[in-house]
Image (tube, grey):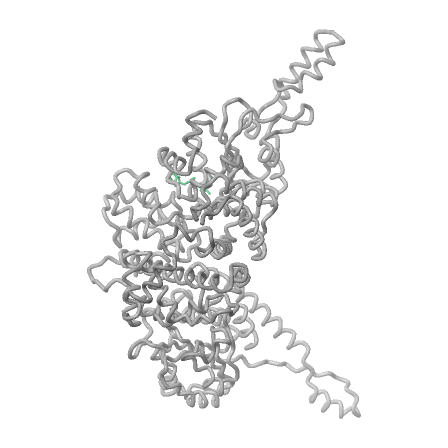
């Protein structure tokens, strides 16, 4: 860890300050958890509803530490060839071909040992995250999208920071990555995975923090309007909607309101722009009924 | 006295044991992480300690509430870790009770001060006032093994939640935009939650002092929606209960129709079979099955919707209406100190939410001062609707039978019962609190078929199931 890195992670206050400095407004809980993840050298499992800043947190940490962000986007059907490594078949083939052509008997044995070396390995995100001497930030995004059996692929990297390749042996981390896994909680993750992580739940921010996020992200937004927006959005999250507005949606709404020249929330303006905030007609109708 | 790392280490081990008792699993690895975490932070900072333990020991948001309660109990301000650095030691409260304004201020004054502290966001003042309120009104019985939610409920009842709501609401101002009004009203809900939290903190503190952390943890509330107490539920919990009612109603509907099918299939009409058999010398050649059509009851639901029991009324109405096809008719009446029929609201509205909103804004339920008056409500019901009751009517009265020392008018219930098929009183208070203070369950019990304890969805389900 470089000197500047360690100073950003030296204390909870430093993390808090640092993240702010790279345009991410952490709660005290977020800052404390990031601090601990570093001290305990454990991945953070970040869970919460859509659009509450889970992915952005990983990006912000990579900005803060000036580290490369390695992202593994999960999806159904993800396998080790896409997540960890793959042999570079065409390159191996070429090597074999050239050995054959040389007509030298002894060379085949040499080739067998040869083609299963680092040179013929294609690094996928998990392997890439631990190789190279410069430490990285590894984001395993939406891990709840892979089948529970596939989670096993991540375990070795997450707890031992190493990858085992049968033909080759075990590759130990050349540098320690900071690891963030996100989940929208569409299914229970395995106990094995959860045990290896420390846990952070990112719910909707408090009114106060959302107001600050808005003023930070939306140029030209007044403190007063930001406050009204965060209050109104907090109210909407309390009524029974199919999909509550997320932070990204409240940012979009603020941008819309600004572009329409609003300086305060009022009935007509709110009604005509609710579709930016709410994605279902039923939800929009409900919100409008509350303005009766 | 300041705690050493060793003290914290032992405490964390003990704490993990309590979490497991409260059904939050903590593995060995997680315990090790937790002890490493406290080495990395300043554990004397309660909030740092809370986050460190949560992040390492708990891996699901659904356990947060239980975790927080166990944490608050175990690392309560009373325990030897924090007593030096918290500004809320005993001194403050005692001074308030003895030398300060504690003695002089009356109930109304106390309520006003609570409202001011809430509005001004004065956390310390609020804690002081709540401390006085609990000392005066909670009626805490030392040594009793309860979770404390009823102490909180009792205190709120005395402070009068309705009056607090009224005082917190912004004044009606025609100029104000509707959006601003919506926001302001939503904030009122937030403030009331804050008051409830502060109350619970104080009560927990006393319970821990009385019985010790371990004993108190054992009484921590369950978190399944069907076990949550109606009258002490927080805002979040009320949401959970609300979401559980839909599935519960479908389950009940399936069960009811299954029962109806089976009943239809298997009822032997013994008389008819016997009568016919006489023609064949007493040999039952032909079996006659009875087409049993159990007449569906007609429901009269009469609900107390004053502050502390309002959510119970709401859930009961929601469930009964979700099952309305299993009844021949449902009529709904609500009251505080006056009664109003709200059946129309349900037929006009497309959703139960809408109907509840109409009830809250349109129903005329306040006659004098807005203190619940069962007697007056019964009088009005009798005057207006008694003739509508028939032997098909089943009457459900919903409320805690806390009558603010008004006349009970229980004799009116006798006539209501005589004219109907059955009369049930559903009470969201635990039975061991009935008949204490201004609760007059006893007087109504005489005329009701049953007074049923309905503290949670589980009990409500059992009762509603028995109706059909
Ligand atoms: N604390 C914060 N500080 C600054 N910006 C934030 C914060 N929280 C959320 N945002 C903003 O909200 C938006 C949504 O965040 P992000 O995409 O990280 O959400 P997510 O939780 O990963 O959502 P999903 O589950 O849909 O992937 C981003 O544009 C981000 O800038
Ligand atoms: Mg994301």
Residue at (29% x, 46% y) in the render: A226
- Is residue A190 visible in the rendered structure shown here? yes
- Measuring from the top left, give residue B118's x and y in whole percent: 31, 60
Residue closest to the eye, B295 or A182: A182
* Position of B406 relative to B36 (above/below): below
Taking the view exactly as shown, the residue that stands out farthest to the left is B175
Rendering quarter of residue B151? bottom left
Using the rendered image of the protein, determine whether residue B167 is visible from the camera's viewpoint.
no
Image coords of residue B417 (percent x, y): 48, 87
Q: Is residue B127 above or below residue B395?
A: above
B327 with respect to A150 (left or right): left
Residue B54: image location, x then y, percent: 50, 47
Name the side, left or right, on which B58 lies relative to B128: right
For the point 58% across and 80% down, the residue is B294
Q: Residue at x 35, y 33 (%)?
A: A21
- Residue A174 to residue B322: above or below: above
Q: Could you tell me residue A270's position as x and y percent?
A: 29, 51
User: Which residue is found at the position 71% from the left and 17% from the top?
Assistant: A112
């Amino acid at each position: 860890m470089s000197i500047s890195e360690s100073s950003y992670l030296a204390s909870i206050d430093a993390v808090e300050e640092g993240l702010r400095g790279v345009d991410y407004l952490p709660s005290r809980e977020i800052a404390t958890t990031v601090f601990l993840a570093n001290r305990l050298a454990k991945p953070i499992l970040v869970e919460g509803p859509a659009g509450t800043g889970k992915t952005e947190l990983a990006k912000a940490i990579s900005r803060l530490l000036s580290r490369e962000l390695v992202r593994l986007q999960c999806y159904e059907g993800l396998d080790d060839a896409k997540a960890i490594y793959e042999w570079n078949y065409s390159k191996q083939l070429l090597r074999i071909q050239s050995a054959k052509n040389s007509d030298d008997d002894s060379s085949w044995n040499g080739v067998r040992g040869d083609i299963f070396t680092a040179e013929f390995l294609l690094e996928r995100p998990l392997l890439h995250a631990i190789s190279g001497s410069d430490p990285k930030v590894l984001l395993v995004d939406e891990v709840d999208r892979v089948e529970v059996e596939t989670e096993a692929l991540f375990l070795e990297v997450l707890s031992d920071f190493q990858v085992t390749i049968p033909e080759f042996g075990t590759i130990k981390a050349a540098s320690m990555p900071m690891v963030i896994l996100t989940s929208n909680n569409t299914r229970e993750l395995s106990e094995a995975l959860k045990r290896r992580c420390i846990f952070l739940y990112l719910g909707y921010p408090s009114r106060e923090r959302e107001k600050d996020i808005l003023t930070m992200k939306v140029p030209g937004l007044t403190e007063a309007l930001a406050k009204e927006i965060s209050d109104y959005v907090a109210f909407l999250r309390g009524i029974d909607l199919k999909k509550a507005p997320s932070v990204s949606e409240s940012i979009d709404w603020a941008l819309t309101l600004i572009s329409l020249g609003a300086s305060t929330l009022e009935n007509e303006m709110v009604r005509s722009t609710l579709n930016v905030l709410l994605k279902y007609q039923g939800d929009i109708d409900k919100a409008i009924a509350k303005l009766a | 006295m300041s705690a050493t790392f060793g003290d914290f280490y032992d405490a964390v081990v003990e704490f993990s044991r309590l979490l497991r008792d409260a059904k939050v699993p903590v593995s060995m690895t997680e315990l090790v992480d937790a002890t490493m975490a406290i080495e990395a932070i300043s554990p004397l900072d309660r909030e740092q300690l809370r986050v460190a333990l949560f992040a390492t020991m708990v891996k699901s948001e659904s356990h947060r509430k239980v975790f927080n309660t166990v944490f608050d109990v175990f690392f309560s301000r009373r325990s030897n870790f924090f007593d030096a650095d918290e500004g809320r030691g005993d001194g403050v409260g005692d001074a308030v009770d003895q030398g300060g304004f504690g003695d002089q201020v009356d109930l109304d004054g106390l309520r006003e001060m609570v409202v001011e502290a809430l509005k001004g966001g004065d956390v310390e003042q609020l804690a002081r006032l709540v401390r006085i309120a609990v000392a005066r009104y909670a009626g805490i019985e030392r040594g009793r093994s309860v979770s404390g939610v009823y102490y909180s409920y009792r205190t709120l009842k005395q402070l009068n939640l309705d009056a607090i709501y009224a005082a917190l609401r912004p004044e009606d101002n025609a100029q104000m935009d509707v959006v601003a009004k919506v926001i302001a009203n939503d904030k009122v809900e937030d403030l009331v939650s804050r008051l409830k939290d502060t109350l619970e903190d104080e009560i927990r503190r006393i319970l821990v002092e009385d019985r010790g952390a371990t004993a108190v943890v054992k009484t921590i509330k369950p978190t399944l929606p069907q076990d949550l107490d109606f009258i002490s539920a927080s805002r979040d919990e009320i949401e959970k209960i609300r979401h559980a009612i839909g599935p519960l109603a479908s389950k009940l509907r399936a069960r009811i129709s299954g029962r109806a099918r089976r009943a239809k299939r298997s009822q032997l009409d013994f008389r008819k079979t016997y009568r016919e058999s006489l023609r064949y010398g007493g040999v039952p050649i032909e079996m006659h099955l009875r087409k049993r059509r159990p007449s569906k009851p007609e429901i009269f639901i009469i609900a107390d919707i004053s502050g502390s029991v309002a959510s119970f009324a709401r859930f009961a109405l929601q469930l009964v209406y979700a099952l309305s096809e299993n009844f021949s008719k449902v009529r709904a009446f609500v009251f505080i100190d006056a009664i109003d029929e709200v059946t129309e609201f349900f037929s006009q509205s497309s959703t139960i939410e809408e109907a509840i909103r109409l009830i809250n804004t349109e129903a005329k339920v306040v006659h004098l001062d807005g203190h619940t008056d069962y007697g007056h409500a019964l009088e009005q019901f009798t005057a207006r609707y008694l003739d509508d009751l028939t032997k098909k009517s089943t009457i459900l009265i919903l409320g805690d039978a806390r009558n603010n020392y008004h006349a009970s008018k229980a004799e009116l219930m006798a006539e209501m019962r005589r004219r109907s098929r059955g009369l049930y009183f559903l009470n969201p208070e635990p039975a061991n609190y009935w008949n204490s203070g201004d609760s007059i369950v006893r007087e109504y019990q005489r005329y009701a078929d049953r007074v049923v304890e309905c503290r949670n969805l589980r009990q409500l389900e059992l009762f509603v199931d028995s109706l059909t």
